[in-house]
Image: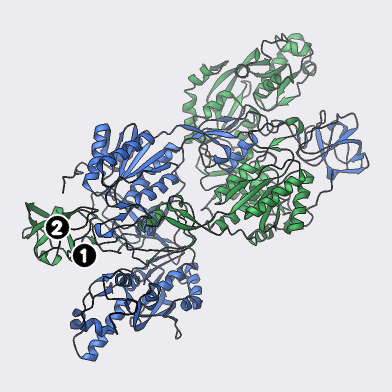
Chain colours: A green, B blue
Amino acid sequence: MSKRKEFRDLSTVEEAHAAIESLDLDPGVETVDLDAADGRVLAERVDAGLDVPGFDRSALDGYALHARETFGAGETDPATFTVVGTVEAGERPATDLGAGEAVEIATGAVMPPDADAMVAVERTDRDGDTLLVRTAVTPGENVMAAGADIAAGERALGPGTRLTSREIGLLSALGVDEVPVRAKPRVGIVSTGDELVRPGETVDSGRGQIYDVNSYAVAAGVREAGGEPVVYPHAGDDMAEMERALREAADECDLVLSSGSTSASAVDVVYRVIEEQGDLLLHGVSIKPGKPMLVGQFNESAYIGLPGYPVSALSIFRTFVAPAIRRAAGRAAPPSATVAGRMAVRERHEEGRHRLVPVGLVTDGNGDTLVYPVDKGSGATTSLVEADGIVEMPADVSYLDRDERVSVALFSPDVRPPTVFGVGEDDPLLSRLLDRLDRPRYLGHGSRVGRRRLRDDVSDVAVVSTADEVESGTELGGWTREWGLVVLAGNPAGIEGLADLVERDLRFVNRSTASGLRTSLANALAALADERGVDRHDLVDAIDGFDFAVESHESPARRVVAGDADAGLGLRATAEKLDCGFVSVGEERVRVLANPSRTEKPGVERLRAELDDIGDLVGALPGFGTVDDR
Amino acid sequence: MSKRKEFRDLSTVEEAHAAIESLDLDPGVETVDLDAADGRVLAERVDAGLDVPGFDRSALDGYALHARETFGAGETDPATFTVVGTVEAGERPATDLGAGEAVEIATGAVMPPDADAMVAVERTDRDGDTLLVRTAVTPGENVMAAGADIAAGERALGPGTRLTSREIGLLSALGVDEVPVRAKPRVGIVSTGDELVRPGETVDSGRGQIYDVNSYAVAAGVREAGGEPVVYPHAGDDMAEMERALREAADECDLVLSSGSTSASAVDVVYRVIEEQGDLLLHGVSIKPGKPMLVGQFNESAYIGLPGYPVSALSIFRTFVAPAIRRAAGRAAPPSATVAGRMAVRERHEEGRHRLVPVGLVTDGNGDTLVYPVDKGSGATTSLVEADGIVEMPADVSYLDRDERVSVALFSPDVRPPTVFGVGEDDPLLSRLLDRLDRPRYLGHGSRVGRRRLRDDVSDVAVVSTADEVESGTELGGWTREWGLVVLAGNPAGIEGLADLVERDLRFVNRSTASGLRTSLANALAALADERGVDRHDLVDAIDGFDFAVESHESPARRVVAGDADAGLGLRATAEKLDCGFVSVGEERVRVLANPSRTEKPGVERLRAELDDIGDLVGALPGFGTVDDR
């Protein structure tokens, strides 16, 4: 392994903010057409170039006349006029107004010369050209004078104004069809790392390839912050190519982000380019996750190096980089993206580094917001969507107590707690059932974890399998599923049941102990041991792969399909979906249990209603059944 | 005037919502590339198609080995291994692991076959190929198992999920490069009205032409709500052409919006098309503004007719149409776009119709939110940007009292009160000064209105001219400006002063009585009358156009340039800007006065600081000066 730079002198969070604020990301000004201007930020003041309205305009349907000639008129004592013409909107008034004359005129039309007021049609009676006016009006009444809305020379909109439909409306009224706006800061994204493959291509897992998560995710973050992302092609493992990509990005962009590789040679290239061509302002920050952040500049571009793990990269992006892009774009910080809540569990960490703790939100039975840490390790990408925001733990804080009040910085202002939060079995019927709910959150961590999260008052519901446990929640409903051994199509090995796994030289793939299927398997093996009068542990030890546990309900079957095993623990539905053979062993019951204090939550009630109506889902999945004895 | 349809049976607000909810705007599903998917709404569930990670992955830099061989190892009692190889990220492990062997391995790299744990490099000492391991590890420790993040077959994201950078990250990790999303509802915008001209073209004010405000403003609103606007070309005054545009829009779009003309013939075309080809569900709503809303369907498209006035059109769009577009796009309502405040003034209306009252927000000295109505008449476009939101007044409520608590539906969640709110003189130096503030709001309604709004505790500051009033606010600063008569370049009429206006046959253009300039003029004329020993009213009556008052500080000069007058009341700076001649009459002082209870507001303090530093602004504007005797 080549020598890595060590992050011995870590900068503080404040120093990191200051270093990034010192970078120049100013993208300048560009002119855009009005129909593409919404969402942009005005770069210069816009003064009205003309009067709006451009003429004295009638504010209602009625008659234009001389106000002084209505003096004293009333309901019982009308003034009499002669109608001498008509003006519709968009017409030039043809008629001058003599004494005692009136012109019929539509809302929005031009007032005839000399006429100085409008009488509403409802306050008149007309017979041929004779008009009785049953009210008195004052000069200017029911007329919008030229320039009364906004007059030529007046300040219409100031620099820094974010253009929404309302400002677009005002600019339209001024006849403006293009506007000077702040250009979007161009942000180049260079991903370094031999092991990264772009989505859509094929990964070779055997040589450790993974999909590049950061390029598209950071690009989306750049857009959300008001920047324009430019994703540069992968340089692969050619160091010269990578250096070229970095230099090209610096030439073309206001800011270059490289999302870090774990490969030492790639890191070295980044260091070399910056040290040769620019300045490294900051090198390692005392924050977790995100320690290996770099800040600098080269080739007249700003540069920030993000950590490689997606959760770390997006945390650092959100905390440090997005505010800088927003500033450069002239965007205000998003409003009030903070909620208060209390910790659902205790969270402990070693002191010494400022921590950004990803957390999820859940509403308890009283409508209060509970906050729980989402920690799947910083290499996990699912925590990107399982968390709702960040709780900051300063370097000198070692724990957050259960029930402690905390402030959560939401990932975006429109983040809300899920309507229902469940933990438990990974199940194909459940996946479809969840599609019928609005914003559910479900973690398929297995029955065991599901029970624990329910007991700890974190989750609303648990989805558990096997009937032999004493369940503490309120049962909302459930279903049955047929399980057994998933084998190759046509069952070429002629496997007939669990006994074959024990007696023959077959490779098996199991599920983890968190899964209810694993418990059902253990129960079935215990019964087989009893039947044979042998110790169950001897039975288990005889199965090649019993300890080889994989993650999801489909995983064992996929191992079989890939030729890595002869049989896998699984469901009939999975076997049929993947065109495999199936050796049935038993049927187990899946129960949906609610936290008793949250059965009134609308999301839980909705789930219960959907559970009462799962006939079509059960019918569509082979081996699934409804529970009759509820 | 042709017979108009009368809105005799107005529908209630609830009926209008119900009619719009009954429309089918469903745009269906489309597939988009991942790099264009952020902001879109997932149309279908996405299950993981592969394991993430796709291999057992090292979670740190260190050594892969058999965990059982570290049993009992510790700081003082290390276990000894032989290093037999190296695996970097992106490499295929070349080495099988024998007894007592270890492999050096980088974070993210593939675990060699048989190795089941990682020891961190920090817990080892190495000398050549000999490795001392000073800790014990358990099977799986520091390894992320294949599928542990998310396994093939697991539910990754549900339908209805809004895709942000986080979801884009997860989809990237799954190798997904295109996703099924809800299509954006296509919304056709047909503007009807002979008098409308698109921005960028030339308006003929003489025949009542105005710029089309609604097309671009509503298009921006459609985009904000998640739809895709299609603006159709103006049909002009050709009724057959208009009918064709409506039908074309209905063929191509999920929803057609026509933004109403005030011209009777255009309205008739809309009615005829809908009655012949579809259904009119609703025809007039008991709401103000917005009564003439239409709801219906034709040619298999939904149809909503918006009122013609921009403020009314955008109110109705926001209240009724945007929610329907959001629903069709699968977007949630924007979060918490509501603030509470208290009325700064009393607001009175006739009962009988539900009212959407546009209001502005201002923060008082205690940080409380005050709410004031913005009412410039529904024909005004400036109230689009002078208001921050809407207060609803039900049909049976006739007034909102001063200090009454109200809830304001903001135009968007990121609306915030201005940092400083001023009312008063329209002035070119002030326009530039405001550019230096962050989100100011300023209404150039003249000194008189400025003083009243300050006295009523509505505004933070007033900007007033003329020195003879006893001012009640706290003076923050000010400047002087030279005023007089703006005449044609070269002063062809040879005007020498105010006396010429009185004595000669000259056409004059005045400012309104709200303007400080008007007061300065009146004072100068009073002085002239005293000098001559005549009645000032006789002097004023002798000036042709003294009562012809226009709106902004530039308006009289522009009338002179247009040939409509010989002289206009104005500033030397304006005369020079518009290349006019100038006859100086006097100098007046402009004062910036703060509400005494709000001098500590940060926005007011910032304004005071900028006022202390206006030397460059004064220098750039001819006839402006600093005030020396503060």
For marks 1 and 2, give the CA distance: 16 Å
Q: Is residue B303 above or below residue A497?
A: below
Asked if labels 2 and 1 touch by Cβ distance under 8 angstroms, the answer is no
Of B626 and A377, which appears nearest the observer?
B626
Q: Is residue B546 left or right of residue A132?
A: right
- Do dots 1 and 2 share one subunit? yes
Image: A228 above or below A467 = below
- Label of residue B41 in the image: none
* Nearer to us in this view, B235 or A410: B235
In the rendered image, which quarter is residue B12 located in?
Answer: top left
Q: Chain of mark 2?
A: A
User: x, y (%) of residue B374?
Assistant: 33, 59
Marked residue chain, label 1: A
Res. A301 image quadrant: bottom right
Dot 1 or dot 2: first in sequence order is 2
Q: Which is more toward the observer, A482 or B301?
A: B301
x, y (%) of residue B64?
83, 35
Instruction: Look at label 2 and name its amino acid.
Output: Val
Q: Residue at x 34, y 77 (%)?
A: B489
Mark drawn on residue A140:
1
Query: Mark 1 is on which residue type?
Result: Gly
Q: Is residue A514 left or right of residue A147?
A: right
Is residue A552 visible from the viewing direction of this image?
yes
Residue B146, horizontal then vertical, whole percent: 72, 31
Give left or right: position of A73 versus B398: left
Q: Is residue A289 in view from this perspective?
A: no
Q: Is residue A6 above or below residue A379?
A: below
Crowd band around label 1 with a 10 angstrom C-alpha radius: few (<14), some (14–19), many (20+): some
Secondary structure beneath dot 1 equals loop
Count neighbours of disc 2 (C-alpha within 10 A) and say few if under 14, some if 14 to 19, many if 20 or more.
many
Q: Which residue is mark 2?
A: A103
Task: Write down the quadrant of residue B375 in the picture.
Answer: bottom left
